[in-house]
Image: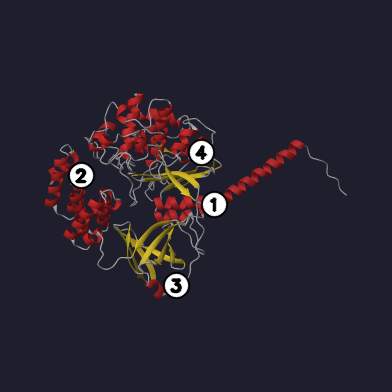
Amino acid sequence: MKIIKSLPIALIFGLMVSTASAQTESRLQKEISSVESGLIPPVRFVGERSWDIASRMKFYNIPGVSIAVIKDSKVIWTKTYGVVDFESKAPVTAKTLFQVASMSKPVSAYAALKEVELGKLTLDTDVNSFLTSWKVPENEWTEKEKVTLKNIVSHTAGFTVSGFPGYKVTDPIPSAVEVLNGGKPANTPAVFVDKLPGANFRYSGGGYTVMQQMLMDIERKDYTSIMDEKVLLPLGMKNSTFAQPLPAAQAEYAATAYSADGKPVEGRYHVYPEQAAAGLWSTAEDYAKFVIDIQHTLAGKSSTVISKKTAEEFTSPFIESFIGLGLFIENYAGAVYFCHGGWNEGFSSYSIGSKTSGDGVVVLTNTNKPLFINELVRAVALTYQWPNYIAPANKILPSTSQELSSYIGRYRADKYGLIKVYKENNKLMAIQNLDTPVELIKVGVDTFAMHDWDFKMAFVKDKATGNGELVQVLRDKTIHARNPKLNEDDIIPLELILGGHFERGVKAYQRAQQEDSGHRLLSEGFLNGTGYELLSQKKLTQAIDIFRVNTILYPKSENVYDSLAEAYLKAGKRDKAKQNYIKLLEINPKNEKVSKILETL
């Protein structure tokens, strides 16, 4: 027998480390490959294949991507794909800067919460107590309830102006006060309260601009410096900045922004003086440091910026179940995640982190295709088995043409909405209001699932009346909504307008507004969005009619006349457009943008 002498302990240890390192590297490469080949829709079906990242980037025309994957509250890998610019074909690198857009908001809220812990702000006090350069305009709503910091960060303050288009690099850039006042050279309306503060959620970048000015008034510094001192530098986010416009030294690392139609943004990207709402430039790895600090703080392992108690408030529901004090909340059967997305002109982004498991991911892109981002996030969640995040795949069951025909009909949705179920090419289809039609795929008795909606639809008979209804069931088996089947003569207001019955439709909307003044489907924002969806579908007459309804229901709003005038212009009706722009100026004579438009008319 041949005897092998023992190897030195140090050498044995070195071999073990090398082997372990190789195994770790091999496992990591398999995980990366799994993510790259595992892009999936919101709902999976047995037997369907996933997509790979290269084909989906081509499908969506994605220029560049940067991703950072978080496990056990650590970045375990980062990777970049594609190009900074289609023209130069320069590859995206770990140092490539992206505008994270509205993902700036939770970082800004973090700084505000830091000020609360330092005693410079309070969460429940009238914010006008801290504002000096500008004040929230007093009106009937603020007389009833004052706006607080809690309201601002949770989008429950009732502020106007949901988002900002940004400015060309050659445009004059307004100050935050000019943005708030809606005065020259700002390109958005004034920010003010037009609903009861603290009542419910309405997304408002305008509110975050109020917070931006408040922090500058308190600290007496520019916002870029405040955010450097309060959040970015303490968290080691050295490749991130709120500077707007971007300084030359950092601009060389910036990705070129591409709009949804694939065209580069003029000047490569827009400038956002609304820094708190949309102004952060970052990398995926850098932004992941922010996500990880939230996780560490929740676990009691960090107090770098805020305390564990404040972090719990930051990531827990306030007024609405889906929003905390600056972050959105998703609860999957007890597994809670905090998240936020972003959309600037030519940039889309998303970040998510688990409150307990230490999982998470950050994805940044230089175009506006959030569906791609969602697919990539699901690939990460599936690979790393995030608790309860990905639902099991559904088994597709056979169905007959006669069976599918039995479900056809119109169903009332959320009282003033409509779900239409119909058959097309022997497939059962459903469309809600003006949304994109979806296929209903049988997965159980009278039960159907969809690729893009993460809940099931069940067709049931009401035992008491015998009438049919469409029941929407969430993943945790709770009933989201019951949608009764409509008779032929039961027509919702939206149908009347779209069917050309304008006078009847207006009266129906007015009756509905008297009964349910705060209903989502009767809101100015919903009707305005419906009008613009019709414009995008080239249905000009129907779009104009919806905008006309909005002016009747909300006659004191600048925005409704602006939208109607825009629709009239698209229809070539310049006189009608002029009339509505004049009405807008009667409400706000200081609207210089509209004054300039009128000069051209």
Tag 2 secondary structure? loop
Give the percent coordinates (x, y) of residue 410: 31, 65
Quadrant assignment, res 596: top left
Q: Is residue 273 visible?
A: no
Cα–Cα gap, marks 4 and 3:
47 Å
Q: Establish if 230 lies above or below 85.
A: above
Circle 1 or circle 2, nearest the eye: 2
Q: Residues within 10 Å of mark 4 (few under 14, many from 20)?
A: many
Tag 4, which secondary structure? helix
- Assign a secondary structure to mark 1: helix
Whether residue 287 appears in this view of the structure is yes
Tag on residue 295?
Answer: 4
Q: Position of residue 306 (x, y in %)?
A: 46, 31
Cα separation between marks 4 and 1:
20 Å
> Which residue occupies the extreme top position in the image?
220
Q: Residue at x 35, y 25 (%)?
A: 218
Mark 3 falls on what kind of element? loop
Q: Which residue is mark 3?
A: 399
Foreground residue among 38 and 122: 122
**Which labelled disc corresponds to residue 590?**
none
- Which of 92 and 564 lies nearest the eye of the viewer? 564
Mark 4: amino acid = Gln
Q: Residue 454 at x, y = what percent?
A: 43, 56
Q: Residue placed at 28% from the left, 57% from the top?
A: 416
Q: Amino acid at mark 1?
A: Thr
Q: Could you tell me if the residues under marks 2 and 4 are in contact, i.e. CB atoms within 8 Å?
A: no
Residue 146 locus on image (x, y percent): 30, 34
Give the labeled residue for mark 2: 557
User: Which mark, residue 383?
Assistant: 1
